[in-house]
Image (tube, helix red, strand yellow):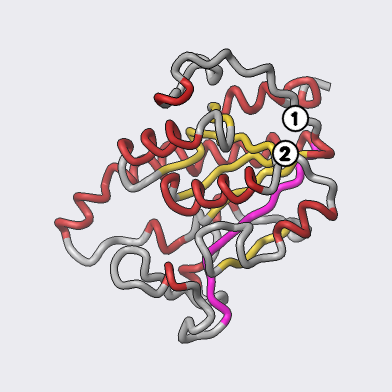
Amino acid sequence: MSWKTAYRSFYYENAEEPEDIVLEPEKTALLVIDIQNTYLEPQDSDAENGRWQPFYKRMNEVVIPNTAKLIDRCRFAGVEVIFARIACLKPDGRDRSLSQKKPGFNYLLLPKDRADSQIVDALAPREDEITIIKTTDSALTGTNLRLVLHNMRIENVIIAGIFTDQCVASTVRSLADESFNVVVAENCCAAASKELHDNELTIINMIYCHVASLEEVSGFIQSVLSN
């Protein structure tokens, strides 16, 4: 199924197909969200490890390899590559937003220099690539990303990362509200379950972004890559 007809919610079931997407490299950035060491670490029990196994499998076999390909293609095309990662500036995490202090899965204490807060080695940023440190779900809220994008005259943002239904979706909505054109590379993203992933993409598609595959996103900048 084409990106033009996939992930249609009730609101857009009968909407016309969107126009072709053309991403000019000098006006486009790739934003890789929260693919950090902490999310690939084992859980505290065998039962939890089993429950999370589909996520680990998707990350290792789909998301990380595909995101590496997308990064390489964007670098080759001259698309700016930017990373965002969850990391607090204070060792005790006092600077975190409330969403990262609440008990449960979203309790995140990741001091910025600790190994588990770093981007995974397979996707390591180059020296001249920007990494945004955030204590919020949205990579735009509470950071200087908005200013960075405007200063570089960026109009289009390609999204990869985790979790689809949390930080990815929050960032997509924030970018859309700021009138950026957003494209989500669906097979460069993951949620804790495939159901959560697919449901969230269906919710945000067409209104806040366009959802497409890595292969389709590459085609949006194909004319540049083929030169």
Say above or below: 200 vs 20. below
Tell which circle, 2 or 1, labels the residue nearer the N-terminal end.
Answer: 1
- Mark 2 Cα shell of 10 Å, populated few (<14), some (14-19), many (≥20): many
At a point 42% along the width and 63% down the height, the residue shown is 38
Which numbered marker is on residue 7? Answer: none
Label 1 SS: loop
Which numbered marker is on residue 156? Answer: 2
Which span of residues is magenta-colored? Answer: 78-89
Residue nearest the viewer, comparing 50 with 149? 149
Residue nearest the viewer, comparing 208 with 62? 208
Amino acid type, callout 2: Asn
The answer to whether the residue labelled 2 contacts the one labelled 1, judged by CB atoms less than 8 Å apart, is: yes
Q: Position of residue 214 (x, y in %)?
A: 57, 29
Q: Position of residue 159 (x, y in %)?
A: 59, 42
Say above or below: 28 vs 42. above
Is 70 left or right of 117, judged from the image as shown?
right
Amino acid type, callout 1: Leu
Label 2 SS: strand
At a point 36% along the width and 70% down the height, the residue shown is 107
Separation of residues labelled 2 and 1 (CA atoms): 7 Å
Which numbered marker is on residue 23? Answer: 1
